[in-house]
Amino acid sequence: IDAAIAGNPKVAAHGKVVMGGLDKAVKHIDDIVGAFKSLSTMHSEKLHVDPANFHNFANVISVVVGSKCGSAYTPEVQAAFEKFLEVVVHALSKQYH
């Protein structure tokens, strides 16, 4: 199954979309909730994504970034990055409330 997922072009394309979303969050760091309002609505009302998946995916992203950054991914950097991801998860989950 792992190879089927890793080799799936749709999964790769969605990964690029997700990382682009994180780029958007950085560019709108002062209003991530506002910047993600339509995205949150789409995931809630159209796609019906379980918001727990946002938390799970944030954890996966943190692990992957940590593995790519190596020793530069200090506990302080990890804490800051995970705090940022928590804000992104909150923004994506906002329309579920």
Image (cartoon, rainbow, N blue to C red):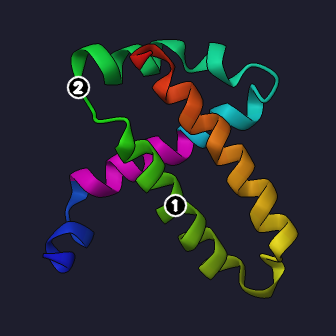
Q: Is residue 27 visible?
A: yes
Task: Name the mark on residue 2.
Answer: none
Q: Residue 30, percent across and down?
A: 82, 23
Inter-mark Cα distance, 2 to 1: 20 Å
For label 2, the residue is 48
Q: How many marks?
A: 2
Q: Secondary structure at mark 1?
A: helix
Q: Quadrant of residue 31?
A: top right
Q: Quadrant of residue 65?
A: bottom right
For label 1, the residue is 59
Q: Quadrant of the N terminus?
A: bottom left
From the viewer's side, name the closer residue of 57 and 3: 57
Residue at horizontal 43 percent and vertical 54 percent from the top: 57
Please identify the residue farthest to the front as the structure is shown.
Answer: 97
Residues in magenta, as a range: 10-20
Q: Residue 77, percent across and down?
A: 83, 66
Q: Is residue 23 visible?
A: no
Q: Residue 59, percent across and down?
A: 51, 60
Q: Give the overall secondary structure of the magenta segment.
A: helix
Q: Is residue 18 magenta?
A: yes
Q: Secondary structure at mark 2?
A: loop
**Residue type at mark 2?**
His
Residue at horizontal 19 percent and vertical 79 percent from the top: 3
Left/right placement of residue 57 relative to residue 49 reads: right
**Residue type at mark 1?**
Asn
Residue at horizontal 23 percent and vertical 25 percent from the top: 47
Q: Quadrant of the C terminus?
A: top left
Q: Earlier in the sequence, mark 2 or mark 1?
A: 2
Quick one: label 1, few (<14), some, or many (20+) residues within 10 Å?
Answer: some
